[in-house]
Image (spheres, rainbow, N blue to C red):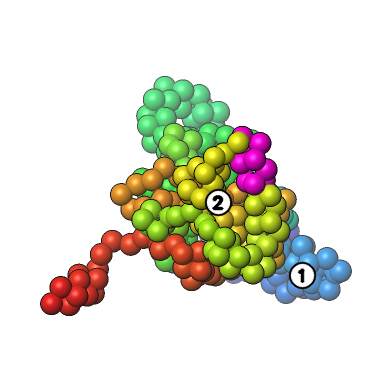
Amino acid sequence: MNELLTNWVGSLPINETYESMLVSMLSMSLILFAAIISYYFVKRIIVRLINKLIINSDSNLDDIFVDRNVFNYIAYLVPVSLVINFIPKAVGQYPSISDGLVSFAIICFVIVVVMLLDSVIDSLLDIYNSFEVAKQNPLQNIAQVAKLVTYFIALIVIVSIAIGESPLKLFAGLGAMTAILMLIFRDPILGFVAGLQLNFNNMVGVGDWVDMPQHNASGDIMEIGLTTVKVRNFDNTITTIPTQSLINESFKNWRGMQESAGRRIKRAINIDVNSIQFCDEETLKRYSKIKYIKDYIISTQEAVSSFNQDNNVGDIESLVNGRRMTNVGTFRAYILAYLQNHPKINQQLTLLVRQLAPTESGLPMEIYAFSAEKNWAKYESIQADIFDHLFAVAKEFDLRVFQKPTGSDLQSIVNQNN
């Protein structure tokens, strides 16, 4: 091409001094024109055809590459490559101009490659996140490290091109700056190591419900990044926690509950000890009409009578002598039977009703069971329904639920005294 332009320019009536300059300018203009044409050709035809084929394919995963504009960067690589290869031939007579243009084109090439790799990493991460395994083993931090390494290498290459030195010399010189680099990249390095530990030990994943009171975080993990972990709290605020904090500090992960067969109910109802009493025949007759404990009362009465006869209990008319059934014991048996027949309680897991040590607030009667529903709202509704029933039914067993005196209680006492 240079020969044709030289012959054509030589036939023009201009000074020979400017012939070479004109040839170089024309050659460079043709190369730039060809680069622009190649860009539009690749962009409008080839890239559009590739995107169309991918969108029309059966799989939806490859559509991510289109959404991330991966193939669009190819349109930039072609014209830049043309400039790098042909500019030295076009303006070879002017080494300083040729070297400057080539260096600039190579820098542009490196930048486009970095953008392409960045888009590819994002696409691969999106594809990985579409699988269920990504929730337990997130790779967000590894992707960020890969981007960081890519940017760092690209920066070294660009600087080496700008100053005209080999990249290897710059990498060798970085050995003396290790301490400074460690200080600069301290948080990314610690975050990366912490992220690997979290992944390999399966400690936490995206979507897990975690509690970290020291960071005021209680909610679902949105993202596990290189340096931070984002938690969406239940009030829809977002707490950002350093990734290494999940390694260095304690936290509660509710994943085990979500993966188990039930969610624990552990709550007590306080009984006024002054309402606890022995059951007489009339009381037991009334209790035996309660569906869930009818068989319990019959079997327990037989066991009590047998015990008293075998142990020659003297005066059974006295409630103190021998074994006796109590209203609080019968109430505990009722609660257990009620829970055993409750459709929302998992009967395969631990189920018990126990008395705790008496306190100044009465005798705690604790329920320890597991709801078959793990959803928070449904779980709370089931728990509330159970205790609504128990509070209301306690008086059927001649028991009073304990509560500290309120203003109305004190007023009623005053009225009675008056």
Quick one: which residue is furthest to the right in this view? 58
Tell me: 62 left or right of 126. right
**Residue 100 lies in the magenta stretch:** no
Task: Determine crowd level at label 2: few under 14, some 14-19, many 20+ residues with C-alpha closer than 10 A.
Answer: some
Tell me: 123 left or right of 397. right
Q: Position of residue 205 (x, y in %)?
A: 60, 48
Q: Give the residue type that dot 1 points to.
A: Asn
Q: Does residue 81 lie above or below 54 as drawn?
A: above
Q: Quadrant of residue 343?
A: bottom right
- Whether label 1 touches label 2, CB < 8 Å: no
- Between the residue at mark 1 and the residue at mark 2, the CA separation in whole angstroms equals 81 Å
Q: Visible in this render: residue 204?
A: yes
Q: Please name the predominant secondary structure of the magenta segment in the image.
A: helix
Identify the disc placed on residue 51: 1
Q: Does residue 160 lie above or below 358 as drawn?
A: above
Instruction: Give the residue at mark 2.
Output: 325
> Which residue is at a point 46% across and 23% down the rendered structure image?
175
Q: Position of residue 98 (x, y in %)?
A: 56, 49
Which of 409/170 is in front? 409
Q: Position of residue 364 (x, y in %)?
A: 43, 51
Which of 272/66 is in front? 272
Is label 2 in a helix, a strand or a loop?
Answer: loop
Q: Which residues are magenta?
A: 303-311
